[in-house]
Image: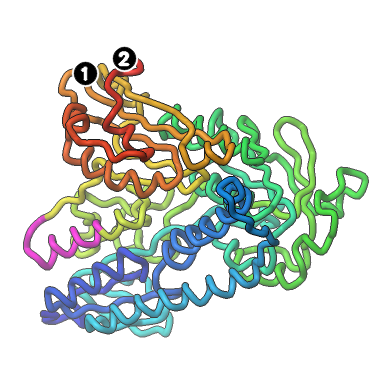
Amino acid sequence: MADAFDYDLFVIGGGSGGVRAARVAAGEYGAKVALAEDNRYGGTCVIRGCVPKKLMVFASEYAHVPEEAAAYGWDLKAGPFDWHKFKSKLSDELDRLEGVYKKLLDGSGVDRFDQRAVLKDAHTVELADGSTKTAKHILVATGGHPVRPDIPNADLGIVSDDIFHLDRLPKSILIIGGGYIACEFACIFNGLGVEVTQYYRGAQILRGFDDEARGLVAESMRDNGIDLHVGSNIVEMSLASDHEDGPQPTASDASMGASAQQAEVLRKQSAGAKAGQTGPIWVKSTNGGEKVFDMVLFATGRDPSTKDMGLEEVGVKLGRRGEIVVDKYSQTDVPSIYAIGDVTDRVNLTPVAIREGMAFVETVFGGNKTPVDHELIPSAIFTQPEMGTVGMSEEDARDAEPVDIYCTSFKPMQTAFAGKSNRVLMKLVVSKKTRVVLGCHIVAPNAGELIQMAGIAVKNKLTKEQFDATCAVHPTMSEELVTMRNPLRTA
């Protein structure tokens, strides 16, 4: 199929979206495909995001098991968390998954180039070794990367990519940010026994999500011991050793801070880290408060990874944040060049990147122009408790049309029996005119599992009456989704 080109398709980026597109184009459509990846196969999700983060979520949730088990008659002994043991097994698992990705590509007949690739023209890429490859179609799937704020000494802090390389856990950590990454890691570190403080400059964490749901998450985080400050930000930071007369480190043992070995890891992982600058970090906040932390984590956003790729030079349009501008078929202004995933900054979720890759293949190699469907995508935030959401928030829905709000909050049976004050939330946003369920929001243990099923119903535009016609599974938390008969309020 390649004709005058070396390949029918050249993919730049070995994350979930790029790998799926490459292997389906080669394996199912017989295209001659190559893929270049200059880091590790699996991309952000497998290597630096979803997978290791979720395994850390699991690890952090065991802290409360002995106490709750005691209420049920068990005598389980709590012990300290062994970061080194967990990290070693985590590394092995990520190696295994990366191997799976490589085998999938090899098994589909995709040529792999384990090096950086940049664009030279509409049909040519140049590899790091200086060689060039031509392709009828080029797909850019280089993902995104975490960014630090533009303040002096920001390189003293870490970003999310660095967490999985830490030599040891800090005694205390300050997390800057209020998005899902910041909140998830706040809960993770808290569960692992780290003293967690979180600053967010906005009025409430998890901006853009349903107000009632994110309010319950914030309340639960504080109840679990996280020192959460909204309307706060960092204005200055430096090594605590530069402020010897100021506040003292929160760690009782200086060895709990960043060790020399940890500092070396962070220097390798974080661009621009200053050699030799280790130890507790002094921070001043916007309210004038000063405190010292063993570590500072910036979770203040991610940018598309498009720098120095030759995109604009060949005519590909970039947006304000460096994102590749594409149409509904993931095609750029250069007809032979497409882009999918976080590098386009549309909906930055791994399953979305995979679906975009599939739509691209169907369009280009299947002969069936398939637009990407970004409507009614279910998602989960792995805080403690989790939040699952699909469709419109109450605030967005009521701005669009009159709605009925069905909502309940209660103590779930399992933790209530153990004397815990934890509460969960089940919420449906319903159109008054059509009775279609426009949104579903769940804050509860395993909300991510629950929202997948609710997402099927919302995606298919089921009505509240169709929810009600479904028999409840009792006793469960989720039965509330089909037993709320009367609206709590009308908006």
Q: Residue at x 73, y 51 (%)?
A: 172
Residue furthest front as drawn: 73
Residue 359 part of the magenta segment: yes
Image: magenta residue range: 355-369
Residue matched to label 2: 490
Label pair 2/1, CB-CB below 8 angstroms: yes
| Amino acid type for the residue under numbered disc 1 | Lys
Q: Is residue 132 above or below residue 425?
A: below
Horizontal side, residue 276 vs residue 147: left or right: right
Q: Bin the neighbour count of mark 2 within 10 Å (Cα to Cα): few under 14, some 14-19, many 20 and up.
A: some
Give the secondary structure at mark 2: strand
Residue 455 part of the magenta segment: no
Asked which quadrant contains residue 295, the reply is: bottom right
Classified by dominant secondary structure, the portion drawn in magenta counts as helix
- The answer to whether residue 384 of the structure is visible from this angle is yes
Front-lying residue, 116 or 72? 72
Q: Residue at x 56, y 36 (%)?
A: 220
Residue furthest left as drawn: 367
Q: Residue at x 36, y 82 (%)?
A: 113
Quarter of the image for the C terminus: give it: top left
Horizontal side, residue 491 vs residue 266: left or right: left
Horizontal side, residue 153 vs residue 142: left or right: right
Front-lying residue, 188 or 324? 188
Asked which quadrant contains residue 266, the reply is: bottom right
Q: Is residue 69 above or below residue 232?
A: below
- Residue 139 is situated, as x and y percent measured from the top left of the image, at 27, 66
Compute the Cα span from label 2 to label 1. 9 Å
| Amino acid type for the residue under numbered disc 2 | Thr
Residue matched to label 1: 432
